[in-house]
Amino acid sequence: MLIKINRDKCTGCESCIQSCPFDSIVMKDEKAEITETCQFCRSCLNVCPEGAIYEIEEASDKKEKEEGSGVWVYAEQRDGVIAGVSFELLGAGRGLANKLGTEVSAVLFGATEADARELIRWGADRVYHCGDELVRTFNDEPYADLLSGLIQQYRPEIVLAGATPIGRSFIPRVAARLKAGLTADCTSLEIDEDSKNLLQVRPAFGGNIMATILCPHTRPQMATVRPRVMKRGEYDESRQGEIIPVKTDNVRSRTKVIETIKEVSDISVNLQEANVIVSGGRGTGGEKGFKLLHELAEALGASLGASRAAVDEGWIPYRHQVGQTGKTVGPKIYIACGISGAVQHVVGMQSSDIIVAINKNPEAPIFNIATYGIVGDLFEIVPMLTKKIKEAKGL
């Protein structure tokens, strides 16, 4: 896109100069002129009293926007198990595809045809499946080569992947090869009703704002999405779709994965798969407060989470952190104890089915999103809650 000035209409009033936040409009021979530093913010378009400023679409812009159709989801797998975020993205992709009047496809590397059938039951219309030995285990180079080749061949309009270690590792390589835009760590996706562009929402500036990002001129529009921020679609056992075999004949790799070593950790820290999470913040006051939360979590059979403030204080290890710089979770029940509700934390848990907030400050922002709120001292409420749960369980 380009912003132009009709010099015949320009009267040199300088109204546009005052409107430009980037100082990209200068006077030349008593006429306004746009410089190369223009950021296409469009602030100047409506300020000219003579209508001398206008926007034009370049041929390359029109060509790229007209190319491509369909929503693609990269279905991540590890050790033959499809990641939960893949099913979440199929649900989100179905919603986007319905608004665009198109289809949803999944791309699956390294798993079995039975796994591909499962993706169809979760909402995919077709699955591009490759089970070759080369992609059996994750390796950036062949994965990026194979996916970028498929995108160039079939030209989808939108490509989604999980913002997981695997997605964050090779999806940027794919975007770079295709010279496409990529928005990382999205928490929401929508379709703009007017332009039909993908609206990609993610935290920015340390989580202090939620930015909506568009890639209007390049295709595909690419985004990685945090796990557990979106709900799975409907599972249909009888759903039918097409499986397209993909070969690796033209894919080469200069590296080979010899061995994968898994980190051994406490199962209670597997926050992203937990159905119930008890989480603590600065209001816990320290290790004494987290001891109470641990007892409550044990009584509930829950995982133990924390806000960044509690982790920064050294009260609990980082692997328990929930939020923008921690894990994104979506349990059935999330119990927030002594957590104020800063946007950085809310981003990581707002998709929970039920949110219970315990805080002695009735004005705490956490109550704005809580399903149930308890105003009171957690040092009194949590022990009582633990006792009642143990009594109900006969412990």
Image: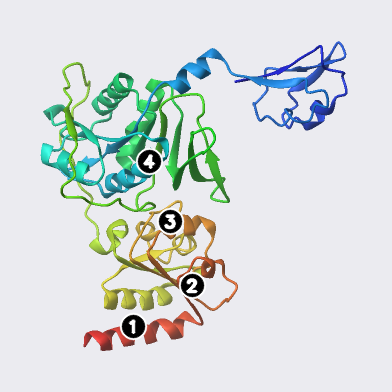
Q: Of residues 206 and 313, which is closer to you in this image? A: 206
Q: Is residue 17 left or right of residue 96?
A: right
Q: Is residue 320 left or right of residue 367?
A: left
* Residue 140 in the image: above or below residue 338: above
- The residue most toward the front is 101
Q: Does the rendering let one see residue 114?
A: yes
Name the amino acid, label 3: Gly
Sequence-wise, which precedes: disc 3 or disc 4?
4
Quadrant assignment for the C terminus: bottom left
Residue 348, disc: 3
* Residue 324 in the image: above or below residue 199: below
Q: Of residues 318 and 376, which is closer to you in this image? A: 376
Label 2 sits on residue:
338
Residue 169, disc: none
Q: Helix, strand or loop at disc 1?
A: helix
The residue lying at 74 percent from left, 21 percent from top is 53
Q: Residues within 10 Å of mark 4 (few under 14, many from 20)?
A: few
* Residue 188 in the image: above or below residue 128: below
Label 1 sits on residue:
386
Q: Residues within 10 Å of mark 2 (few under 14, many from 20)?
A: many
The residue lying at 37 percent from left, 51 percent from top is 230
Name the amino acid, label 1: Thr
Q: Residues within 10 Å of mark 3 (few under 14, many from 20)?
A: many
Q: What is the C-alpha distance between the residues marked 3 and 1?
A: 25 Å
Nearer to us of marks 4 and 1 is: 4
Q: Residues within 10 Å of mark 1 (few under 14, many from 20)?
A: many
Q: What is the C-alpha distance between the residues marked 4 and 2?
A: 41 Å
Whether tag 3 and tag 4 are in contact, CB under 8 A, the answer is no
Q: What is the C-alpha distance between the residues marked 1 and 2?
A: 16 Å
Q: Whole-percent x and y of residue 200?
A: 48, 40
Sequence-wise, which precedes: disc 3 or disc 2?
2
